[in-house]
Amino acid sequence: MKKISIVVPCYDEEEALPLFYEAVEKVVRKMDVKVEYWFVNDGSTDKTLAELRQLHEKNPNVHYISFSRNFGKEAALYAGLQAATGDYVVDMDADLQDPPSFLPIMYKLLQTGEWDCIGTRRTDRNGESKIKSFFSGMFYKFINQVSNTHIVPGARDYRMMTRQMVDAVLSLKEYSRFSKGIFSWVGFRTKYLDYQNVERVAGKSDWTTWELFKYAFAGIADFSQAPLNIAVWIGSVSFIISIVSLIVVIVRHIINPNTDVFGWASLVSIILLIGGLQLLCIGVIGRYIGKIFLQVKRRPIYIVQEKK
């Protein structure tokens, strides 16, 4: 009998956990497999850890890892994948936006040997703000233009993977992790199941527009050098424009020495423009240097305070 490990990153999911566990149990009880759960408490501020302790007492196949503080969902997912021992590993969110009804379908498709991973993707973003939907669409278009790693638009982290693929994902030890990109970068044969967006069963999302923006930029920086190339082009264009402008001023002064120079307002505007472009380019380069700095310090991706 095959074994499936279900990895669930959790942050302030006190209300959703009992509902999630019951919903998944109804599905896996009908499957001819062994199941283990690995919940990862990512420094929750509510009673998520207490709920996990109760689930562990109720079912010994329910395990949990509790971090010493909040390290982020990527670290929680990495910890769960490291702990999982199943022949197949599933990554799910605790808010039930990932339909448990897909689990038997995923397992059946993997059993054919034709696929190494069965992923999911949303066909719509109903229930989300138009601003989030717009920037999400722009992100996928941009990153697929500038990166050699193709990321499927609307793809969720919700997927079932073979042990071979999980080991490949774990072999990537980078500190700054972008799982959607990593899942694509390691390759393997992947099939996606489409479904319409599902609302959270309880609680509220901690992913604000700003958090999503930072996550998107991290993904672009991790899988593309486009921001660095853009900075180079901005610097080159600014340099050329400044040289041309200088030549125009000199020629104009030679032809007519009495011609008034541009006013101080124009001069200040030009200085601010060039200064702003320089700071932008330095900032982009700084983000990449910051990632290098974090990586070379070799700090742990997460710290465990409690594990059962």
Image (cartoon, rainbow, N blue to C red):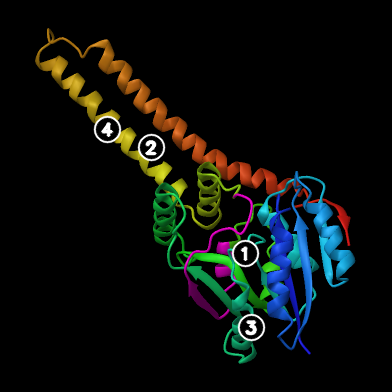
Q: Nearer the viewer, residue 268 or 122?
A: 122
Mark 2 or mark 3: whose residue is earlier in sequence: 3
Q: Which residue appears at 80% of the width and 67% of the height?
A: 83
Dot 2 or dot 1: first in sequence order is: 1
State the separation of the CA atoms marked 2 and 3.
54 Å
Cα distance between the residues tagged 4 and 3: 61 Å
Q: Which residue, given by chain and number where applicable, does mark 2 sit on?
A: 235
Residue highlighted by disc 3: 104
| Amino acid type indicated by mark 1 | Leu
Say left or right for 199 vs 42: left
Residue kind at label 3, given as amino acid type: Pro
Mark found first going from the N terminus, 4 or 1: 1
Residue located at (68% from left, 50% from top): 72
> Which x, y percent locates residue 153?
45, 64
Residue picked out by circle 1: 96
Disc 1 packing (10 Å; few <14; some 14–19; many ≥20): many
| Relative depth, front residue between 37 and 221 | 37
Q: Are marks 2 and 4 in contact (CB under 8 Å)?
A: no
Q: Quadrant of the N terminus?
A: bottom right
Mark 1 or mark 3, earlier in chain: 1
- Dot 4 crowding, Cα within 10 Å, few <14, some 14–19, many 20+: few
Q: Is residue 167 above or below residue 239?
A: below
Foreground residue among 50 and 170: 50
Q: Regarding mark 3 in the picture, which secondary structure is present there?
A: helix
Image position of 237 with respect to 165: above or below = above
